[in-house]
Image (cartoon, grey):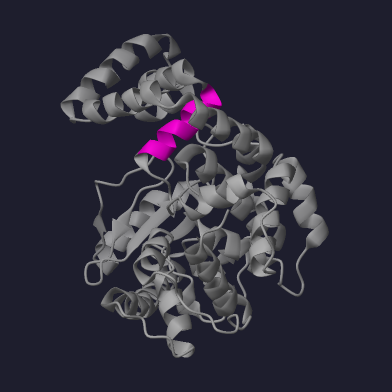
Amino acid sequence: MRTPVQEAFLSIIRYEIAGTPLPEGFSVPDMDTLLELSERQDVTHMVCDALLKNGIPCGNNILTSRYYAAIWRVEQMDHEMACMSDLFEKHGIDFIPLKGSVLRGLYPQRWMRTSSDIDILLRAEQEKEAEELLVKELGYEYDTKHEYIHHGTLFSPVNHVHVEPHWTLFHDTHSRSSCFEVFDKIWDRAVPDPAGSGHRYALSDADAYTYLVAHMEKHFHQSGGCSIKGLLDLWLMDRIPDADIEGRKRMIREVELSRFEDRIKDLIYCWMEGRNAENEQLEQFVLQGTLFGTARSITEMQAARKGRLGYMASRIFLPLSQMKLLYPVLDKHPLLLPVMWIRRLGKVAGKNDRRRIEEQIKTTIDADKEDLRRLRELGDYLGLE
């Protein structure tokens, strides 16, 4: 059941995104708790804006500081995107802006849709050249602390805006096989971006919508978190006048996410229409969670879906497809997989990551059976694999 603070929070979100007036006599039951909730979901700036517009004292300097920080952050990201666009156009680098840099145009004000970084998709054969250009021409630096299997990460020298150049939208070890297969040839369906130039492309409406749903599902079952901003993105995408509804439905079926889409959209429509949620467990999972989940929620969600032993084994013995990315020698010599498992364990210890893995395994062992049962039920409700 929603708490009074959660009810106030959702009223504020409706006001900011849909323009729905706050209820008569609206007040914030507990400003500190409201701040904690909005901070977890990175929407503190919207909460501050709504309170200020309605003449309600914020009573907390963090609220106003987040408001101005959000405006600054988006302006800096737009500036960096413009610089990259000019650079890539000059050198013939094809790219597709992703996520927040595209979706914020759907919001009443661009600064409302914040993001932690700029995501772009590059052709695999141009990825290395593009990164070298960012370093050489714009002074970017590699962020070696945040390297991932399907993308690197760099940051700008002055304002430290992070940029994540992707060479694939989904990796076969990190998502449903259907998502990887459908989006593997995404460049064949890319369309020229009306807001760009010769080398800036965009996802089609159906691709952009399906990518958003699939990306949410991936984070849901892998990270144990669900972003309220992702839910708002879906609601706003449904309001695009010339949306390709039939194309969206077809692609959602192809990636096998029809149930997940239905359930997650039920929730955001209940919120935006001021109705009670159809599934309180899902609602509380989102409202009580964080943007990308916590270390504990990630572990427990994985343990709930894979089983305790299955999860522990997956942390220690990565599949061949993922190990190939870490050890290319396995492409030609797959029988060396057991040797590479041992080598990886040795390197993990050398990087002081063993403690983190041990903590994850301990969390799995200690996880409450009832909590895991509820997570399995939630996963079944959403159609998670």
Residue located at (73% from left, 43% from top):
259
Instruction: Give the residue at the far right of this rendering.
Output: 246
Left/right placement of residue 265 relative to residue 347 reads: right
Q: Nearer the viewer, residue 8 or 360?
A: 8
Provide residue 190's location: percent of width, then percent of height.
Answer: 64, 58
Q: Quadrant of residue 63?
A: bottom left
Over which residues does the magenta segment extend?
296-306
Between 146 and 152, which is closer to the camera in this rendering? Answer: 146
In-front residue for pair 181/359:
359
Q: Is residue 51 above or below residue 308?
A: below
Instruction: Report the predominant secondary structure element of the magenta stretch.
Output: helix
Splitting the image into 4 quarters, where does residue 17 fall?
Answer: bottom right
* Residue 256 x/y as whole percent: 72, 39
Residue 295 on the magenta segment = no
- Please state if 114 lies on the left or on the right of 206 as rendered: left
Quadrant of residue 154 within the rendered picture: bottom left
Classify 21 as above or below 227: below
Residue for point 46% across, 52% down: 288
Query: Where residue 122 sits: x, y (%)?
Result: 48, 54
Residue 84: image x %, image y %?
39, 69
Rendered residue at 32%/76% (across/down):
69
| Viewer can see residue 289 | yes
Which residue: 56% across, 49% down?
Answer: 216
Q: Is residue 154 above or below residue 180?
A: below
The reply, left or right, for residue 71 in relation to residue 282 is: left
Q: In terms of depth relative to the viewer, which is nearer, 209 or 324?
A: 209
Residue 299 highlighted magenta (yes or no): yes
Count of numbered marks: 0
The answer to whether residue 102 shows anywhere in this view is no
Q: In the picture shown, does residue 114 fall above or below 354? A: below
